[in-house]
């Protein structure tokens, strides 16, 4: 008997911001998204269903697949389109096929936030070697946020970039936990933190 489908993450990014879109373009295996596109990020279990869901939505709508991943337990997918309506329709098709509603997703949980002012040159160099986004400059303020499920990191990062003049150092939206690293002035980093937290807390869903 097939396992019950569990919707872990379901989030629509209405308008991809320039830095996040550019960073995602370096991470995806499929079609790279560009600034201004709408993006749908979904995570569910059992993960093997990802193949069926991606097949369905790319045939039924004009979305382009960026991510199709099966982890140990979970499946993750991301599709995008220049048309926000196409991305929304892809989500409706996916939910209907799974017998789910958007509110059946897990409500995101913020696991930790770190706020590091006046970053040292040595720590900046370590991060710059490992992070695929913008360069962290000594003296800037670094914001780190970790969330569960991982896919919500896309939404948190996009909303933070909308709200503040920050740089996206890194964003991980697949795996056990999601993470974003942003930098800028202390004032802008605070604004980004507030926007990211507000965005995640505003999403309705099931408690863990």
Image: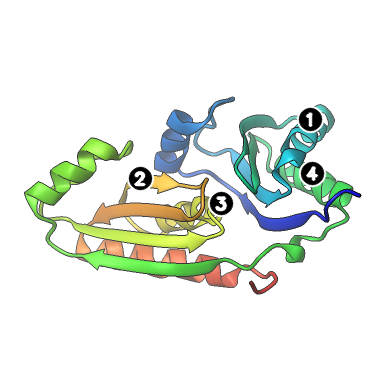
- Which residue matches tag 2? 170
Circle nearer the N terminus (1, 4): 1
Q: Nearer the observer, disc 1 or disc 4? A: 1
Secondary structure beneath disc 1? helix
Residue ID at (66%, 74%): 207
Which mark, by number, is residue 151? 3
Task: Say whether disc 1 or disc 3 marks the residue closer to the N-terminus.
Answer: 1
Q: Which residue is mark 4?
A: 89
For marks 1 and 2, the one nearer the N-term is: 1
Classify 10 Å Cα crowding around label 3: few (below 14), some (14-19), many (20 and above): many
**Label whose residue precedes the other's in the sequence (2 or 4):** 4
Q: Position of residue 49 (x, y in %)?
A: 77, 40
Local SS, label 2: strand
Expressed as whole percent of the image width and height from the top left, the position of residue 136 reads 20, 46
Tally of numbered discs: 4
- Whether 65 is drawn above or below 84: the answer is above
Question: What residue does disc 1 label?
Answer: 55
């Amino acid at each position: 008997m097939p396992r019950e489908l569990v919707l872990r993450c379901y989030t629509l990014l209405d308008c991809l911001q320039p830095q996040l879109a550019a960073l995602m373009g370096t991470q995806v295996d499929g079609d790279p998204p560009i600034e201004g596109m709408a993006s749908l990020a979904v995570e569910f279990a059992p993960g093997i269903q990802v193949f069926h869901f991606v097949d369905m939505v790319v045939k039924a709508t004009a979305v382009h697949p960026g991510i199709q991943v099966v982890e140990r337990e979970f499946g993750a997918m991301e599709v995008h389109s220049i048309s926000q309506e196409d991305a929304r329709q892809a989500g409706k098709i996916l939910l209907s096929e799974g017998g789910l509603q958007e509110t059946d997703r897990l409500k995101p949980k913020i696991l930790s936030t770190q706020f590091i002012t006046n970053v040292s040159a040595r720590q900046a160099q370590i991060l710059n070697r490992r992070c695929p986004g913008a360069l962290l400059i000594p003296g800037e303020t670094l914001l780190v946020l970790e969330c569960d499920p991982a896919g919500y990191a896309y939404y948190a990062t996009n909303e933070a970039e909308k709200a503040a003049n920050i740089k996206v150092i890194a964003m991980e939206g697949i795996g056990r936990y999601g993470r974003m690293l942003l930098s800028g002035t202390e004032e802008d980093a605070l604004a980004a933190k507030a926007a990211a937290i507000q965005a995640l807390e505003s999403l309705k869903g099931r408690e863990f």
